[in-house]
Amino acid sequence: MPLVIRAHGDIEQVLVTALHKNFVSKVFRHCWGKNNTPYFAGNCFKGVIYFDERMAAAFARESGVEWNGWLALPKHLHLIAAVFESGLELSVSCRGRVIRLGSSGLDTRSRSLTFSALAGKIGDDQVAALLGSVDKGAMVFTLADFDGEFEPDKLSAEVTRLDDFFFEDALVTGLFYDGREMSMEMGDSRGMSMIDPVLIDTAGQRLDMYDFTA
C-alpha cells in the first residue's frame, strides 16, 4: 500500500531565464513614460511581462527576438514546489489513516542553487531574469511500495534556497521516508499571483529600472 503525503500551502513555480537587454530597456522606458514613480513603473513592467503578450511581443520584435509568453521562455532553471514555512501542513495517508503534521519538527537538509552554475548561459546582450507564480494548493509525494506503520521521525525534506537569485522563499524540492526519495507531482491549485521579476547581470549583481533607462 502506498504512502501518500500532501504538502498544503503556497505552491511556487520559479524559472530563471534570459531576456534581451534591449527588450528589457524598451519595456522599462514604456513603463517609465506612463508612470512617474519607480513603484508603479515596476508594476507596469511586471504586467507587460506576465499579462500583456501583445505589447511584449511588439517590443521583442523590435529587439530582434521572439515572444510567446513568459512560460515559453528558455528555462535555465525551473522549479515547482511548496514553500517551506510555518503555514505548511503535511497530510499523511497510510493504511486508511490520515495524520496531519506541521513543518516545524521536520528534519531538513538544505541545498543552494548558485548563479555561477548557469551564468555561462546568459549572453553578453542578455540579463538573467527570475520569474514565477504563486498558488494556494498542494504538492503530492508518494512512496509506492511502502510497508509497515508510518513513523514521523523517519520523514525528512530537502529544502532548496535561491539566495544567489535574490529570492527569499525556501522550497521543498523533495521528501524522503527512511532515506528513500518519494515521487513528487503537483496537486490541485487555485488563486495564482505573480512573483516580482528579478533581473541579474552576468556578474550576479541585481539590476533595477535605472540600469535600463539611464
Image (cartoon, rainbow, N blue to C red):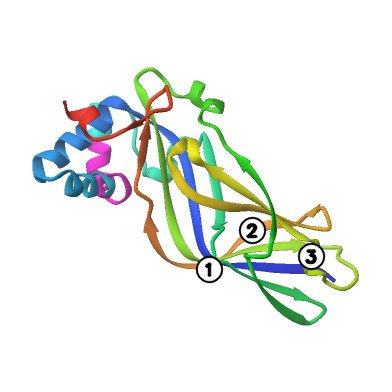
Q: In the displayed structure, would residue 205 be above or below residue 6? A: above
Q: Residue at x 86, y 63 (%)?
A: 145
The residue that mark 1 highlights is 87
Checking the image for residue 185, the label placed there is 2
Badge 2 marks a residue whose secondary structure is strand
The residue that mark 3 highlights is 153
Q: Residue at x 34, y 48 (%)?
A: 196
Q: Residue at x 82, y 69 (%)?
A: 151
Q: Amino acid at mark 1?
A: Gly
Label 1 or label 2, whichever lies nearer to me, is 1
Q: Alpha carbon of mark 3 to alpha carbon of mark 2: how far? A: 23 Å
Q: In the displayed structure, would residue 87 be above or below residue 59? A: below
- The reply to whether the magenta stretch includes residue 117 is no
Q: Earlier in the sequence, mark 3 or mark 2?
A: 3
Pick the quarter of the image with the N terminus: bottom right
Q: Earlier in the sequence, mark 3 or mark 1?
A: 1
Span shown in magenta: 47-58
Q: Residue at x 59, y 46 (%)?
A: 160
The percent position of residue 13, horizontal first and vertical second, equals 49, 52
Residue toward you, 54 or 167: 167
Quarter location, residue 187 = bottom right
Farthest residue, direction right:
148
Mark 3 neighbour density, 10 Å: few (under 14) some (14–19) many (20 or more): few
Residue toward you, 16 or 48: 16
Badge 3 marks a residue whose secondary structure is helix
Pick the quarter of the image with the C terminus: top left
- The reply to whether the magenta stretch includes residue 52 is yes
